[in-house]
Amino acid sequence: MRFKAPQLGAMGVTFTIMRACQFASLITVTGLCANFINGIATTEHKPPAELIGTLTVEVTAVIYVTITYILYYDSMLPLLVAGILDSLLLVASIVIAALVGKPLAALDCSALPSPVPVIATFFSSSSSTSAHPIRATVITQTLPYSSFVALDQPTCYEIKAVWGLSIAQCVLFAFSGLVCVGLWHRLRRQASAGSSGPKDIEG
């Protein structure tokens, strides 16, 4: 069902705002998670599964949000399908928020130490051994997520920002999914009204 995006009124404007907010939130979380993973990788640890999963979902969602808004602007977006996919991303966002926030609810960032190099914290127990054994063992060691979030104040505040934005994404995808379904219902109703309207039988 084709439509003119500028003619969809307040719901169309709401959809545009939702997509803009989603894009900004997703890009921010993607950047933070990528920075975390890069910092952990430099210490030759494997990043926690929570961060890898979050980054995977966020990157996928960025691509989806971008493509669907382009299709919407070009009046080619299947609104009902988009509503269903937004609902799936809502579920994914809820899972991510739960996993990321599990150790954070009772964590007081202000009580943590000032910025500490990750390598100093997680390599201190191995400093007396040679470089090669450290590389051989540590490169296969997965950094526990609960230990990572309590590393220092900046890490704690940044991961709490990821948690907060993940919760915000739950709200945004819930609303955008409802808006997609609402737009689809409106267009369907308008199409039905147009097809059943009075016909000119003069002649």
Image: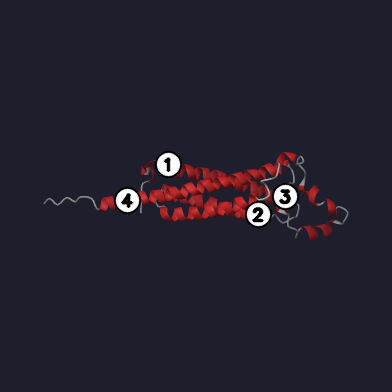
Task: Point out the tag, 1 or 3, that comes first from the N-terminus.
Answer: 1
The answer to whether residue 78 shows anywhere in this view is no
- Element under label 3? helix
Judged left or right of residue 122, residue 9 is left
Residue marked by disc 2: 50
- Element under label 4? helix
Q: Using the image, tell me which numbered label, if any, was put on residue 13.
A: 1
Label 1 CA crowd tier, 10 Å (few <14, some 14–19, many 20+) = some
Residue beneath the point at 60% across and 55% down: 56
Three-letter code, disc 3: Phe
Front tag of 4 and 1: 4
Q: Residue 195: x, y in percent? A: 26, 53
Split into 4 quadrants, where in the image is the N terminus?
A: bottom left
Label 2 CA crowd tier, 10 Å (few <14, some 14–19, many 20+) = some
Task: Point out the tag, 4 or 1, that comes first from the N-terminus.
Answer: 1
Indicate the colouring scheme: secondary structure
Judged left or right of residue 35, residue 44 is right
Q: Using the image, tell me which numbered label, if any, was put on residue 179.
A: none
Tell whether label 3 touches label 2 (CB within 8 Å): no
Residue marked by disc 4: 189
Task: Point out the tag, 3 or 4, that comes first from the N-terminus.
Answer: 3
Give the Cα distance between marks 2 and 4: 44 Å
Task: Point out the tag, 2 or 3, that comes first from the N-terminus.
Answer: 2
Give the Cα distance between marks 1 and 3: 40 Å
Residue marked by disc 3: 148
The answer to whether residue 37 shows anywhere in this view is yes
Label 4 CA crowd tier, 10 Å (few <14, some 14–19, many 20+) = few
Task: Point out the tag, 2 or 4, that comes first from the N-terminus.
Answer: 2
Give the Cα distance between marks 4 and 1: 19 Å
Number of numbered tags placed on the structure image: 4
